[in-house]
Amino acid sequence: MSAIYFPKPQPLSPKTATKVIDGVRKQLIKGQWVNVFGVPITDSVYYYWFEYLKLSEEYKKACANNGKGMTKLYKDFGNVFDEKYEGIEGFWDWWRENERGAKLFGIKAHGNNWISLDEAMSLQNDIKENNIKLFAVPTNTTKTAIKKQFNKLLAKTDFKKAEQQGKPKYPIADSKVDVNSLRKCLRVWKRNKVEGVDIFQIGCELMFLDEAKIKELQEDGRSKKKEYDLDWFWRDAEKSNGRYWKIYDKVMKRLNNKQAKEIEYWKDIEEDEAKFQKERKNRTREQVMDNWGEHTESRGLAKAKGRKPIDYLSEEMIEEAMLKEGYTISDKQRTKSKQALRTNTYRLLRKAEANINAIVEEGVFGVKH
């Protein structure tokens, strides 16, 4: 075949060991790191096209009947449910079989790499029809000189409009399709439709929520116990943003007033205690005989009834007050969080369904992304 390129990174062989260096994927060949045009299989859009097709019950029925009802799709994609196409290795065999991946998703291209003399000879028709031009690059000169020559040629060359260029037989619907999103939608579909897991539970899994958080959301407003949004509190504290300081100033004004009253309260207690002890020391004989001052609860420290001084300006008190003031999770918020979790998970499920239908009905993939 002529040189082929893909609109999205093509899958690499499972046996290809690569490494991303400075944002570029490279492969170690004979002690040298060279650029690799591709990605690991599970990072390729084309792998998910294959996997989503396997979710179609309609296509599964067609494959069981030698493609009846979906002849064209069956002729191109074959029976993807065959056991020999299971797993990563199976996908790679499917992709390479009769150059299937290149034929379905590739675009004839020239210039992405050096071509052999045989490949150049195969381009005669394209050259005659002015679809491509060849540029001979001497290897006994400098790169700067070659670039200047090539740029001059580019300036004098008329290019066809983008819509006249080649397109893959099966195109990606959205050029901005996100592999991570495809991966997540696939997981939601399998967990719900195949394994029968509840949408809420799947949503919790996607958010990596622990059992305590899941239980909290499940209570859904039935609990009256206060919960604090510690995550947001610490995020705001680290950023020291406007919200944090607004709450801080409000809390500190209140705590300073409380601390002033606390200081005044204990000052009165201490003064009354000192006065009481002085009076007790100067008791008359009759007062001593009557046990005056021995069991009183209305004077000095006894009046505090065991109460300890409170430091309203301690870090613990300030933090607690700020949490109560602006970081309390209400029952309404908990219910809203639970609804948002379900809504987002259903959205992913609908995306998966839309892509499954787009493959079998329109021959495209990557819709709603």
Image (cartoon, rainbow, N blue to C red):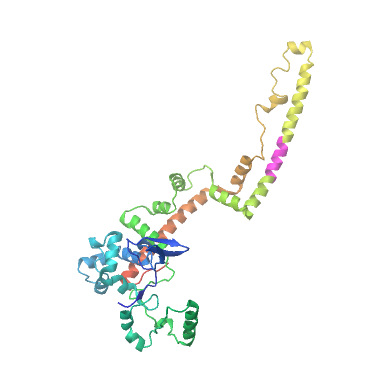
Q: Which is nearer the eye, 242 or 201? A: 242
Left or right relative to 135: residue 63: left
* Residue 241, picture quadrant: bottom right
Q: Principal SS element in the magenta part?
A: helix
Residue sitting at x 45%, y 44%: 212
Residue 176 drawn in magenta: no
Residue 144: horizontal and vertical position, in percent? 50, 78
Residue at position x 33%, y 68% in the image? 357
Residue 90 position within the rendered picture, expressed as x and y whole percent measured from the top left: 27, 62
Residue 232: % across, % down? 55, 51
Q: Residue visible at 72% across and 33% down? A: 265
Q: Is residue 261 magenta?
A: yes
Question: Looking at the figure, which quarter contains the N terminus?
Answer: bottom left
Q: Which residues are magenta?
A: 253-262
Seen as rendered, the residue at the extreme bottom is 128
In this rendered view, identify the residue nearer to me: 176 or 300: 176
Question: Left or right of 194: which side holds 347?
Answer: right
What residue is at 73 percent from the left and 29 percent from the top? Answer: 269
User: Residue farthest to the front?
Assistant: 140
Horizontal side of residue 251 vs 340, given as left or right: right
Residue 259 position (above or below residue 158):
above
Q: Check the picture and name the quadrant holding the C terminus.
A: bottom left
Q: Is residue 98 above or below residue 259?
A: below
The x and y percentages for residue 238 are 59, 51
Residue 294 picture quarter: top right
Q: How many marks?
A: 0
Q: Quadrant of residue 107?
A: bottom left
Q: In the rendered image, is residue 318 in sight?
A: yes
Towards the viewer: 36 or 63: 36
Instruction: Determine if residue 58 is in view.
Output: no
